[in-house]
Image (tube, rainbow, N blue to C red):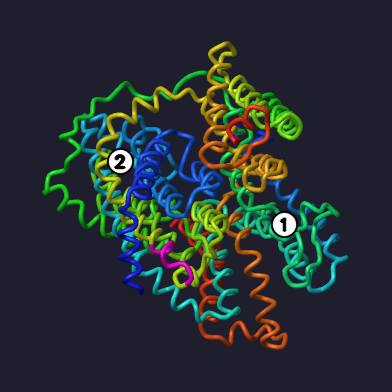
Amino acid sequence: MDYSALLAAGAHAFSLWPLLSLLAGVSLGLVVGSIPGLNDTITLAVLVPITFALPSNIAFPLLVGVYCSACFGGAFPAILLKIPGTASSVLTAVDGHAMTRQGRAGQALGIATYSSTFAGTLSALVLIFFAPILAQYALRFGPAEYFALCILGLSTVVGMGAGNAMKSALACLLGLLVAMIGMSPESGYPRFTSGNFWLYEGLPLTPILIGLFGLSVVFEMLSSERSNARDKGADEVPVRFADMLLPWSMVRRLLPTWLNASALGNLVGVLPGAGMLVAIYMAYERVRRKFGERCGQGLPEGIAAPEAANNSVVASSMVPLLSLGIPGNSTSALFLGALLIQGLRPGPSLFTDTPDIAYLIVICFLIANLAMFPLGLLLARIIPNMIRSVPRALLAAAIACLCFTGAFAIGNSVFGIMVAVAFGIIGFMFNRLQVPLSPFILALVLAPVIERAFFQSMSLSGGSVAYFVTQPLSAAMLLFTLIFMVWPLGKLIIRRRRQVPG
Amino acid sequence: MTQRRLFALSGHWLDRGLSLVCLALGAGVLMIAKGYPTSAGALPMILGWLLMGCGIGLWLFPGKRADMRNVRIGGLLWGMAVFVAVLWLFASLGADVALFVLFVGCAVLSGYPPGLRLVATALLFVILVGAIFGGLLGVPLPGPVFALFSA
């Protein structure tokens, strides 16, 4: 690892504009995370096109700030109003709101803040020390290893994803199909273009992401019941600042839960495609097994586990993107878009070609997590009132305008908007039909890498498919792929056996 | 639960519909990819077969959570109509007019009461977008008002 580059990036991150940008990102993330219906991916989808006019040292701190704090922001309405601000705070709402009803809202918010900061910081350290080492190792990867790694990523997202595995597989195949549009990387032959020259270059990634994450939400708002109502939940809950500061005894009590959940979150985050929900459900399940019926009735560990798990997934999900060029989840796919817009090449060479930016990004994750603590405590009293004052209708209009402008700005053409609108409809249908988006995005991003690596391997081996299993690392990854593919079937058989009486 | 299982717009019937779409898509991909040279057509051919396999799998093991009830079709269709109109306005009149129409259209369709307050909010928001993109970030957006910011 290049320690001098790391130190230089650390010093640069504390200079005026990057630091201001980072703090603005953290504050923005806390606010958008706490507004039900908005989350980090929507905000990043809107922000990525804006960042292409910004220098890298301002753009990335802003994006990192939003990404780090948005999933923590979701805990505010989950605890106070029992409305999860983001999907990652679904389980926080269970014990968090129970504590609010018991008059312990301040303590619940404090636990969420401490857990998120602790786990986020730990995960940022994993990113700082693990990503450059993995990148150095990945420089020795050949096409067979890349092919196997991409296939492993896709199988993880299908096999370990929550919900129907068949639908995850379908999303994955559709993503691959959309990525096929345009000229073949091997022969340059146009595929699925219908002679339309706009499609020869393939569909642009950022407008697709803007549509899937931003415009799909607008369609959801337009198709739900008309109302000028603001988000209401329970009555206003008084939150005292002093209650949010946890006593040492509570910190000591929660420490094992934080460590457990962080370890789980980091492990799941590093796996490309495994997803945040898997981590929070696994961490909560451990707490439920340990505490039994007390879980769900205002147990502090019931907040600490999901909050620590979701925040530890955030930074560790950047490990595969920064070191291998493979996004770990949908949000890091947006980061991939931002890196490409800035003219950077994600992957092993990022740390050797542009160490200043690569190390700045990883250092920003650490600072953002640390900044989340004071900002979270400060904003915890303001944000719930802010949530109540935002009319949903104006929110839909503002998101639509920003999505249209962003999709246009990427290529300075209306084609970007057309792509965004089309994928907005697809995203809306996916949400309604419970088809997960992550496999689609991951397949879309990985398809060109898979195809290129496959043909390169074929030409290296003289057309022998056995080449993939004769390379030890590639063979190991393909073995894991097989395990992940068989996993849903195994789960189904075990569940059916348990259901059999006796 | 029973209603959910029986209603055509929810549960496993929607997934069965999706599986048919999947089968049709797979067949379409196979037909198109047949005309491609081997190097360009290999992956689409594999995808076509896998899509058809996935369609059969989804028909046999449908989920129960897909739900198209409570979708306000009118709102959705009007929304699409506004988006198409805004696309045309974007290309012909400029981004400023288009974004104004988009803001007002989306707000009204989502239930915000039409009136002077909405018009003023929309104007302010569009000017803010123009100022950020054109003035601060230097991204030229087409349109007579936005041209002032770029200048």
Instruction: Indicate the position of residue A277 as horizontal and vertical percent values.
Output: 44, 51
Which chain letter goes with mark 1?
A
As displayed, is residue A47 above or below residue A161?
above
> How much space separates mark 2 and mark 1, taking CA atoms?
48 Å
Q: Quadrant of residue A263?
A: bottom left
Task: Name the secondary structure under disc 1.
Answer: loop
Task: Name the secondary structure under disc 2.
Answer: loop
Of pointers 2 and 1, the one earlier in the residue sequence: 1
In this figure, which residue is indicated by the disc labeled 1?
A: A202
As displayed, is residue A62 above or below residue B76?
below
In this figure, which residue is indicated by the disc labeled 2?
A: A296
Identify the image quadrant of the C terminus of chain A.
bottom left
Q: Residue furthest right?
A: B35
User: What amino acid is labelled 1 in the image?
Assistant: Gly
Left or right placement of residue A336 versus residue A89 in this view: right
Q: Residue at x 44, y 24 (%)?
A: A390
The main secondary structure of the magenta stretch is: helix
Badge 2 and badge 1 in a common chain? yes
Left or right placement of residue A125 versus residue A399 in this view: left
As displayed, is residue A384 above or below residue A310?
above
Q: Residues within 10 Å of mark 1 (few under 14, many from 20)?
A: some
Q: Which one is nearer the viewer's eye here, A339 or A121?
A: A339
Identify the image quadrant of the N terminus of chain A.
bottom left
Asked if marks 2 and 1 touch (Cβ < 8 Å), the reply is no
Which chain letter goes with mark 2?
A
Q: Residues within 10 Å of mark 2 (few under 14, many from 20)?
A: many
Q: Which residues are magenta?
A: A353-359
Please tell me whether residue A356 belongs to the stretch shown in magenta: yes
